Image (cartoon, rainbow, N blue to C red):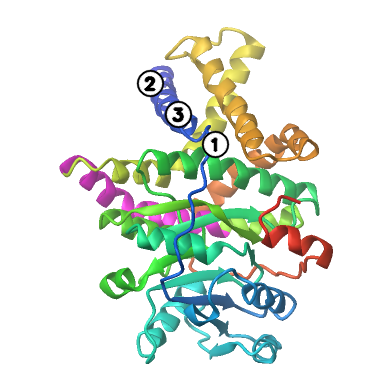
Amino acid sequence: MKYIFITFFIAIQIYVLFLTYYYNVISIFGLKREKEEEDCPPEKNFAIAIAAHNEEKVVGQILDNLKELDYPKELYDVFVICDNCTDNTAKIVREKEVVALERVDRKNKGKGYALKWFFDLLFKMDKKYDAVVVFDADNLVTKNFLLKMNNNLIDGNEVIQGYLDSKNPDDSWVTLSNALAYWITNRVFQLARKRLKLNAALGGTGFCMSTNVLRKFGWNAMSLTEDLEFTMICTLNNIPVVWEHHARIYDEKPLTMKASFRQRVRWLQGHWDCCFRYSGKLLKQAFTKGSFPCFDAFIYLIQPSKMILDAFSFTMLLLRLIFHNIPIIKLVLPGWFWFIALFFRYIIPIIALAFERVPIKRMFAIFIYPLYGITWVPISVLGLIKKDQKVWSHTKHDRVIEEEHLESIINKKRI
């Protein structure tokens, strides 16, 4: 048993260290100012789809927001998918003179099904669109959003993800921790991959797809994380998923740890589900066709396993430190190798936050951020256990931004 444990722990160390250094190296490519390109004249025609389930408290604000976009009004139309709503969402949408499409399907619940239903309707409409943009009802977006999507489509990009920001970072320590996670990820994961010609990860909202891609591949992403699933479908079909750093979507984050925990368990259920269904295909294509984007997507899918094994490795190292040389806890590499990995894990995020111009008072939250980070371990375990459960749960949204802050948000100024 002693030698089995030693072998097992050495294998875990190799696995964890490889993934840690892989992410550390890639993240370095995000630590550079991103130059904003000049906008092209408006040309592309957009259908904006807003998925809404009982969103009467917030849907009005995004509809007002979208009417103020710096883009010709005749080149975009807004559709709200009122999915199994039992409140006044549809009524409010119509009062805003926006198209409310009411869907009732008690069996096939969730955003993936709602989007598929909408896309089927869209292709039957007389008016034809160059692309579809997807938002959630609780979002706000910067006025330049469609201009940036237009630039990308003209450049030949067909699937684009906008910058995911937080609508309510200062509401609680949970929302601030969540916001920090997004600000860091936007630069060291998303922007870094753009520079390396790797695929960004779709974030569930604020993404754009050409109708050519939708017609060719359809929308068959029905998991609890339909965004991740569609990212994998695009990657397997050699469709680049491009990151747009200068078009922001402000998303409402859960106020409490309980709500955040529940939301992230759902994300990890979907993540594990996609991991088991797509990892083999990605790995096969990575080696048979030499596709680095497929290999990188595979690494992303197995990330939850790293969270769990990270915790196990850290516990073993802590025991070794406290009780000194425990014979069965053997390091595969010298201790300094681990310290360098940990050093970069904390220094790179701080540099990323500085590049993102996050105010100092918010950057201090990096000291409590590890508490939020630790919660990913039980969440990853629960997600794995519940990966076959496809029951969709709705996250309640009620955060309306005060008028004094709204102008700053939609003009792309950090508040």
For discs 2 and 3, the disc positioned in front in the rendered view: 3
> In the drawing, does residue 328 fall left or right of residue 128?
right
* Residue at x 57%, y 62% (from the top left corner): 144
Magenta stretch secondary structure, dominant:
helix
Task: Depth check: give the residue in front, 319 or 364.
Answer: 364
Of labels 2 and 1, earlier in sequence is 2
Report the span colored magenta: 266-288
Q: Any magenta on residue 13?
A: no
Of labels 2 and 3, earlier in sequence is 2
* Residue at x 55%, y 24% (from the top left corner): 344
- Residue type pointed to by label 3: Val
Q: How crowded is mark 2: few (under 14 residues within 10 Å), some or many (20 or more)?
A: some
Label ID, residue 7: 2
Distance CA(mark 2)–CA(mark 1): 44 Å
Label ID, residue 364: none
What element does badge 2 sit on? Answer: helix
Q: Where is residue 332 in the image (x, y as percent from the top left)?
A: 42, 14
For discs 2 and 1, the disc positioned in front in the rendered view: 1
Label ID, residue 33: 1
Where 186 sits versus 235, above or below?
A: above
- Residue type pointed to by label 2: Thr
> In the drawing, does residue 76 fall left or right of residue 285?
right
Distance CA(mark 2)–CA(mark 3): 14 Å
Label ID, residue 16: 3
* Residue at x 50%, y 35% (from the top left corner): 30
> In the drawing, does residue 59 fall left or right of residue 161?
right
Mark yes or no: residue 205 visible: no
Q: Residues within 10 Å of mark 1 (few under 14, many from 20)?
A: few
Q: Do the residues labelled 2 and 3 touch (CB within 8 Å)?
A: no
Query: Which quadrant holds the N terminus?
Result: top left
Distance CA(mark 3)–CA(mark 1): 30 Å
Q: Where is residue 393 in the image (x, y as percent from the top left)?
A: 60, 69
